[in-house]
Amino acid sequence: MRVTMIGTGYVGLVSGACFADFGHDVVCVDKDESKIAKLEAGEIPIFEPGLEGLVAENVKAGRLSFSRDLAASTPNADAVFIAVGTPSRRGDGFADLSYVYKAAEEIAEVMDGYTVIVNKSTVPVGTGQEVEDIIRKARPDAEFSVVSNPEFLREGAAINDFKHPDRVVVGVEDERAVKVMREIYRPLFLNETPIVFTNRATSELIKYAANAFLATKITFINEMADLCEKVGANVQEVARGIGLDGRIGGKFLHAGPGYGGSCFPKDTLALVRTAQSSGAPARIVETVVEINDSRKKRMADRVIAACGGSIEGKTIAVLGLTFKPNTDDMRDSPSLDIVPALQKAGAKVRAFDPAGMKEAEALMSDIDYTEGPYQTLEGADAVVIITEWDEFRALDLERVKSLLKAPIMVDLRNIYRPAEMAEAGIQYYSIGRPS
Ligand code: UGA
């Protein structure tokens, strides 16, 4: 199959490289000339484990190429994927669909022969229909189908998620397009991956419903964690105790500082807006959004409390800035609430993140960045772990204690056991567990 992928952001690049690895002929198109030049030189603009090698292998095999020019690849393509951004629209939280519509107009100009246009961007229900209308208006006689095929990739594990998904969802309105989509996902059919064929509106909603449900699960366990702290229970054991019930499932029950990232905050908000404007308000999701926002804002208070009620003039060491490990992505990261709140309370912040410091620098000011976890701790009054990077999981606790001015650790990801901290003589505050 010949595939054109519009957008070389996270979703487009990972999907394009994986489709090429499935054996398809893939051209990834982006308007950003410097991005294309970098990709052609073998440079990967995003941090994703395994992606650089996968891109290089498939470029070398002649199955993957990059271009600025949609007209060069689209006329021959069996399928054109739209994988452009749908950020939150400023002011109202609806998804901004201007890039999707622009892509539709551009495809209409250059497509030739029967083409399946596949929307991979996260878009509200009804967008597939609008894309179809845009193309139909520009090319009344063209032969094409518009399909919805949402992605469920997690940053940091995207290649594995793409190649071994729990399911693939395809929203499609005609048999001809079903055949093309089956062929594109052939290796997964052979692996017996469940492929959910449904209508387009359903597929579009599945994406939002999945993210909103996961965000709800996290928010639920975060509230249970707060309750655990009041009643002397242990949230990790609560999560295990409920998660072993197959109807609940153990995943996405890690209590923490609140969810962040490029997807959950934006998609929950967009679902809330769509539901409100459709006259079927999603009250649970509305509440989840509210609770999560306020949770992130409250996290700095834990550090202040651990330091005896004031951090004025103190130095706080921060380990981890990205919204989760194995990414350099800072979008809606809890650190963006926590660090400024610590600074506002009078603290000096010293921080280390294995991949996110460059991104962080553009978003926050007055942070002293260091070269490693131990350097961050030197002479600090307390340390707070915001992101659970592997390299923070096995710190030499004696060294930690000797470097800190006061042996105080606030672990917002529960990566240590309270008992080992007590033994090491560190005052340890975690989430939802008795210390
Ligand atoms: C999420 C979904 O997991 C993917 O399925 C989806 O494709 C993607 O959004 C998207 O819509 O593109 P991602 O944002 O990469 O993926 O990251 P997650 O691993 O889902 O984590 C999101 C946030 O939830 C992070 O801040 C993480 O720390 C937090 N989280 C996750 C918890 O606090 N507790 C958990 O148990 C799990």
Image: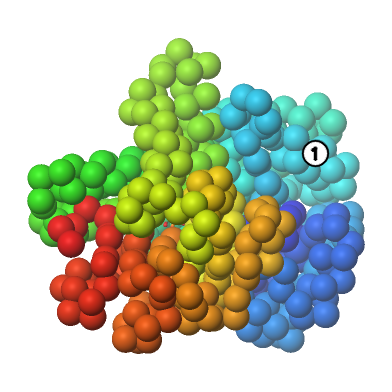
Compare residues 140 and 185 and report the one nearer the observer.
185
**Residue at image coords 87%, 71%:** 37
State the image coordinates of residue 196 (x, y, percent, origin top left). 40, 48
Number of numbered discs overlaid on the protein picture:
1
**Residue at image coords 56%, 67%:** 350
Tell me the residue that label 1 is attached to.
102
In the image, taking residue 137 as reference, residue 373 lies left or right, namely: left
Quadrant containing the C terminus is bottom left
- Please, what is the three-letter code of the amino acid marked with disc 1? Lys
Give the quarter of the image for residue 56.
bottom right
The vertical placement of 432 against 156, above or below, is above
The quadrant where ligand 1 appears is: bottom left
State the image coordinates of residue 307 (x, y, percent, origin top left). 36, 57
State the image coordinates of residue 55 (x, y, percent, origin top left). 67, 78
Compare residues 426 and 185 and report the one nearer the observer.
426
Compare residues 363 and 242 and report the one nearer the observer.
363
Assign a secondary structure to mark 1: helix
State the image coordinates of residue 74 (x, y, percent, origin top left). 81, 55
The vertical placement of 114 against 156, above or below, is above
**Residue at image coords 72%, 40%:** 100
Quadrant containing the N terminus is bottom right
In the image, taking residue 433 as reference, residue 36 lies left or right, namely: right
Q: Looking at this view, name the residue that lies furthest to the front.
A: 313
The vertical placement of 92 against 30, above or below, is above
**Residue at image coords 65%, 54%:** 364
